Image: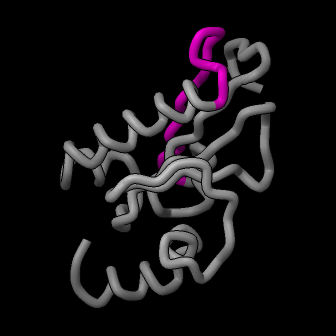
Amino acid sequence: MSGPDSVRAMTDCLFCKIVSGDVPAEIVRESDRALAFRDINPQAPTHVLVIPREHHPNVGELAAADPGLLAEVLREANQVAVDEGVAGEGFRVVFNTGPRAGQTVFHVHAHVIGGRDLNWPPG
């Protein structure tokens, strides 16, 4: 994303503000290009969000723009599961894309969810 809309998105975006340090978050992992922090409304004992530091509105746009960064987000999500002790028992990585899928912050983010039974369909 570039141009005036990208500047507005980054200045208005909650997750961009977390990346910049303007909004506090409980950070659990950091890399040069990604950041992981605890969800403020956890749906399971482990519920961590993993985001790229760079603003991309959703997973489809990130995949098209920078597949390597998407791979890094997924590597960090897996490492969060390992660090949180849920990798062996099972965990879920979810990308909500668009309002009908439940996306409320339009900066791509992976939910790492675990620590309880995760039956399908979710709920």
Closer-to-camera residue (25/40): 25
Q: Residue at x 29, y 52 (%)?
A: 62
Image coords of residue 47 (percent x, y): 70, 39
Along the horizontal axis of the image, is 90 left or right of 55? right
- Say whether residue 103 is magenta: no
Total marks shown come to 0
Residue 107 falls left or right of residue 14: left
- Residue for point 79% across, 18% down: 116
* On-image quarter of the N terminus: bottom left
Q: Where is residue 59 in the image (x, y as percent from the top left)?
A: 37, 47
22 is higher (above) or lower (below) than 81:
below
How is the model colour-coded? one colour
Tell me which segment is drawn in magenta.
Answer: 84-98
Q: Main secondary structure of the magenta part?
A: loop
Residue in the image at 59% along x and 31% along y: 83
Residue 21: name its quadrant: bottom right
Q: Position of residue 106 (x, y in %)?
A: 50, 63
